[in-house]
Amino acid sequence: MGNCESSSTEKQVHPLKLTDIERGPGGGGTSAAGVPQQREVHLVHEIKMPSLGPTTSKSTINGVDPTKAAQINKQIEDQLIKDFRSMEKVIKLLLLGPAESGKSTVLKQIRIIHLNGFSTGDLRDRRPLIFRNVYEALVQIISGLRTLQIFLPDAIEADINEFLTFFTNYDFSNTMTFPQNVYPVIRRIWAEDKVKDIYNHRSDVYVMDCAKYFLDALDRVCDPNYTPTTNDILLSRQETIGVSEIRYTYKDLEFRIFDVGGQKTERRKWIHVFDMCSAVFFIAAISEYDQFMREDNSTNRLIDALHLFKWIGNNDLFKKVQMILFLNKKDVFAEKIGKIPLTVCFPNYRYKNDYKNATVYIQKKFEQQIQNKTKMVYVHFTCATDTDQVQFLLNSVTDMIIAENFKQTGVI
């Protein structure tokens, strides 16, 4: 496999402590200085001062009772905050990053956390998507078998032909029960050890992350009474075309979060949602350090994520925007790093091939892409399918975004 990084002279990176990496915002962060001011909002509000009336109290200042003065001051502060909320009541957040990095999974988590998740009807409506994932997973595995020239028993080859023939021009859009006549065929194919082993060769062939999950769950998914679970929805794969949006309210503020397709052909559409955003969540899948882009099969996925982060982080449109970096799929990365060295992507990597050192190195690589060294980048290593972790991080980061917006407008 070719190297994905220039082997020219590179500064040695001294690993940080893992505890330093996983600090959230406010816990030290990962950069040196504060976020530049986003924009000025001048709050002008005429406060009608209530009549204080005559006073004979000795504890007055210039004839004003300090207690009443404090109350008036509090009224003014409350009104300023109210004005701020009415002027800045919508906070726009962008989810950006390469395809299949986990952006849509984060968006689903936000729906679970802030919008009561998925109803039974919603779950059932996702059955066609799950069935398509089962089909696509097996097609990708079969393609990998052909690419690697792995030969199978004649009986399995016959099953593969039957499977491919059955689904030729098949329409999944209204399929609410998996076709029962082809279910045993898929089951026999997936039971073959050589077929399962393809999943371990994703450095060489493309197989989506959820393939093994759904093929292992074949009996459950193909049951006529199947209803997808929330976890099924989180792990399912659907290519984002165009822009997806979720709106929700948090601490009396309205949030609008946009997920934009990460394929190279979709990135030109991002400009339409850049305007007036408060923060960017950039999602990169660190587990893809040994995988290549589907579009060209020659560009390393993690290197592409680095280049994309550099373009976004240094773009004039984002000079005053807070940047939150989610280095995602840490669970898959932890399993993979002991088997596949980081040097397949970064040939100058000189440290121990373990989770701690490798993640520190990757974090430093992303931070080095930002030319403005005073710009704060909040870094988190994430597993987007872990609802508890995502909820904790989102609450923490959102509170930071709200506080920064208040700070920039002079309310606090």
Image (spheres, rainbow, N blue to C red):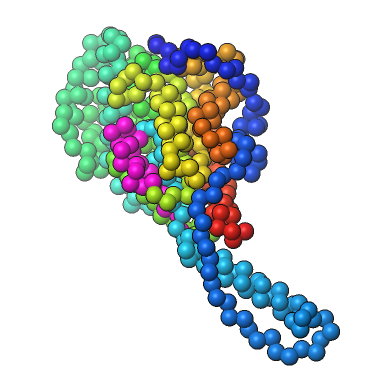
Asked whether residue 361 is in view, the answer is: yes
Instruction: Give the magenta range.
Output: 254-274
User: Is residue 284 positioned above or below 390 on the image?
Assistant: above
Q: Is residue 35 toward the left or the right of residue 234 in the image?
A: right
Q: What residue appears at the point 50 percent right and 24 percent down from the top-left corner?
A: 333
Estimate the x, y position of residue 155 in percent, counting from the top left. Answer: 23, 14
User: Is residue 350 positioned above or below 310 on the image?
Assistant: above
User: Residue 264 falls in which quadrant of the image?
Assistant: top left
User: Residue 355 falls in which quadrant of the image?
Assistant: top right
Quarter placement of the N terminus: top left
Quarter placement of the C terminus: bottom right
Q: Is residue 224 toward the left or the right of residue 63 in the image?
A: left
* Front one among 135 and 63: 63
Asked whether residue 226 is in view, the answer is: no
* Front one among 13 and 198: 13
Q: Is residue 93 inside the magenta stretch?
A: no
Q: Is residue 401 toward the left or the right of residue 255 in the image?
A: right
Estimate the x, y position of residue 360 in percent, counting from the top left. Answer: 58, 25
Q: What residue appears at the point 50 percent right and 29 percent down from the top-left corner?
A: 369
Q: What residue appears at the point 28 percent right and 9 percent down from the top-left corner?
A: 149
Estimate the x, y position of residue 12 in percent, counting from the top left. Answer: 59, 17
Residue placed farthest to the right in the image?
Answer: 58
* Front one among 336 and 178: 336
* Front one among 199 and 225: 199
Estimate the x, y position of residue 131 in percent, counting from the top left. Answer: 28, 36
User: Is residue 47 positioned above or below 143 on the image?
Assistant: below
